[in-house]
Image: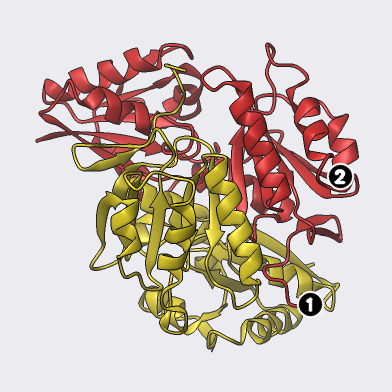
Chain colours: A yellow, B red
Amino acid sequence: MNSVYVVGIGPGGRDQMTREAETALERCSVIAGYTVYIDLIKDRYADKTFLTTPMTQEAKRCQMAFEEAQKGRDVCIVCSGDAGVYGMAGLMYEIKESYPDVDIKVVPGITAATGGAAVLGAPLMHDFAVISLSDLLTPWEKIEARLRAAAAADFVICLYNPSSRKRKGYLEKACGLLLEYKSKDTVCGIVRNIGREGESCQVLSLEELKQTKADMFTTVYIGNEQTRQIEGSMVTPRGYRDV
Amino acid sequence: MNSVYVVGIGPGGRDQMTREAETALERCSVIAGYTVYIDLIKDRYADKTFLTTPMTQEAKRCQMAFEEAQKGRDVCIVCSGDAGVYGMAGLMYEIKESYPDVDIKVVPGITAATGGAAVLGAPLMHDFAVISLSDLLTPWEKIEARLRAAAAADFVICLYNPSSRKRKGYLEKACGLLLEYKSKDTVCGIVRNIGREGESCQVLSLEELKQTKADMFTTVYIGNEQTRQIEGSMVTPRGYRDV
């Protein structure tokens, strides 16, 4: 049976790809993906056929990948980070129902949550919730309910898609909600361009985070009650030894 | 300044390590870690000095790593999965305060949540919460509050440490709580020995999961309202197109 490999290429740098992902990309003849991610790897795989579609045409991208696989070609579809975290893996399975003779293999990658955590220190050492602030496919009421639940139960929170050109002010709105439950001094962190040129990070309070601008290449962390700053790093202790 | 690299080696297989992790291990002369993880990589790095401590002596392991680095040796401390998710990164920062002349660099790895998700299909495609059922360092009341919050807000839930010899019945207890909020038909999944010999997975209902035995090498997934089974895989759609 023909397979399509759904490959997470990690945050950006080649060093943060797994060997399994590298091998899948080397072996295939066709690589499909969003234009921006293809540009990250194109130079390394000059002999491949590339199939790109813009951001809103994810379903078409999946169909193109399946159709190439049906023709007997070895196909990878690439995502930044991990293909299974707000990536293409789910949509591939949904569309697979029309291509019963093609198999899917998901190759995991370093997702922004853990890639960015490593830049900041160790913010995700205890129970955490990952929430996307994008309301393109999810009603804001659902996002708000999750922010409230995660804050009330003292999860460390990691925010994906904190902002975009069309969604200015979402991070500020989210921080406003979290401040109903959490101290304004809660230790937070932001990381920009994880593993890419211009990587930068900042540790700050929840109150300061509320006034901070984020873009779509930013990942945001809000600490739990125990998170603290140690020599400029954001660190959540693993347990509650003193409780 | 001397550095200790805190390296996540991924779920187990060499193929699931990043090149950055491989490079750090190749360059260092001392590798510290929990006995079981050192055994996973010992054959590949025969020329290194290994420092191992058993499971309860994590602090001692960190101190040993810092002391070797202070002597000017290149040191890695390894964790399975990602060092920043229930791993050693946090404790390293806490202990670092006694070793001001040693620097920490965290090298991220594939954590069980995303490694296991790739085996099951695409369960973590939407907002998710990661919760450890271990109450060694966390009061059960806190764990229970997080389970309830995550279930009520319809997060996909990923459970680490679902059981151990001393904590039999914790997974059953957790499922019982979740059943107060979620349908008994909620699509769930378990993965055993991710990326290692004997890897296996199963997709099942929440009611069936409640009656399932897990061990410490098992990672558990509880779907959200939209999670479904597609040709034997566990898949959460990315958005709420029909809402």
Say which mark, if any, is on residue A137: none
Q: Which residue matches tag 1?
A: B242
- The residue pinned by badge 2 equals B204
Please give left or right for residue A85 compared with residue B172 in the image.
left
Q: Is residue B212 left or right of residue B21?
A: right
Do pointers 1 and 2 mark residues of a single chain? yes
Residue A109: image location, x then y, percent: 51, 56
- The part of the image, by quadrant, that contains residue A232 is top left
Q: Nearer the viewer, mark 1 or mark 2?
A: 1
Query: Tag 2: residue type?
Result: Leu
Using the image, determine if residue B16 lies above or below residue A160.
above
Q: At x 64% / y 67%, what residue is drawn? A: A141
What is the C-alpha distance between the residues marked 1 and 2?
A: 25 Å
Q: Residues within 10 Å of mark 1 (few under 14, many from 20)?
A: few
Amino acid, disc 1: Asp
Q: Nearer the viewer, residue B132 or A28?
A: B132
Across and down, in percent, residue B225 comes to 79, 57
Residue occupying the far front of the picture? A180
Query: Whole-percent x and y of residue B63?
Result: 26, 17
Circles 1, 2 touching at the beta carbon (< 8 Å): no
Please report the residue visible at 78 percent of the width from the left and 26 percent of the height from the top.
Answer: B173
